[in-house]
Image: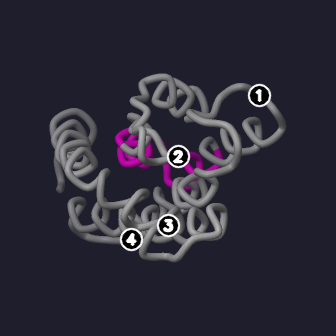
Amino acid sequence: MAGLLALGALLRVPLPFSPVPVTMQTFCVLIAPFLTRPGRAAAGIGLYVTLGLAGAPLFAVTGGATLGYLAGFVAAPWIVMAFRRMAWGMLAAMGVIYALGAVWLSAWLGASLLHAIVVGVLPFLPGDLLKLIAAHQCVARFCRSDF
């Protein structure tokens, strides 16, 4: 899981108006609990975060702007699996990732929560919706057939 997230961080597109880049990490996080159990997925994501905080060059950006999103990543496998319907679980996980990310980004920027949502959530909604659909389709076709 840590390696998968590191690869997802390499596939990034910086946005000139946001300290948060577009990455493939949300896709990785959404499929993680289906590649292994939720606890193992969360542990692997936690390892990624720990290694990055310890100085390993794994994060998509440096400086701490994305720590809230990373915290949401750790919780996401449990959230995804808490729902009977995979799509609802994935949507809920994305909501938690966005919420933690926006709250942290607001504090990190010293700006309002509304500003953090404008620069750290809204620009990502279309792409993350596509990644969620792709993750759902990959899991439904290759990992599990009961969703």
Q: Kindly report which numbered mark, 4 or 1, lies closer to the viewer in this rendering.
A: 1
Q: Which mark is residue 19?
A: 2
Image location of residue 62, percent across then percent down:
67, 37
68 in the magenta segment: no
Q: Quadrant of the N terminus?
A: top right
Q: Residue at x 66, y 62 (%)?
A: 108
Q: Which residue is denoted by mark 3 in the rendering? A: 102
- Report the magenta residues as a range: 27-43
Q: CA distance from mark 4 to mark 3?
A: 23 Å
The total of numbered circles placed on residues is 4
Q: Kindly report which numbered mark, 4 or 3, lies closer to the viewer in this rendering.
A: 3
Q: Which residue is denoted by mark 1 in the rendering? A: 56
Which label's residue is closer to the chain start, 4 or 3? 4
Which label's residue is closer to the chain start, 4 or 2? 2
Which label's residue is closer to the chain start, 1 or 3? 1
Q: Which mark is residue 82?
A: 4
Image location of residue 77, percent across then percent down:
47, 56
Image location of residue 42, percent across then percent down:
58, 52
**Labelled pair 4, 2 in contact (Cβ < 8 Å):** no
- Tell me the SS state at disc 2: loop
Q: CA distance from mark 4 to mark 2?
A: 31 Å
Q: Kindly report which numbered mark, 2 or 1, lies closer to the viewer in this rendering.
A: 2
In which image quadrant can residue 137 be found?
top left
Q: Residue at x 39, y 71 (%)?
A: 82
Q: Amino acid at mark 4?
A: Ala
Q: Residue at x 59, y 60 (%)?
A: 68
Q: Which mark is residue 124?
A: none
Q: Quadrant of the C terminus?
A: bottom left
Q: Amino acid at mark 1?
A: Ala
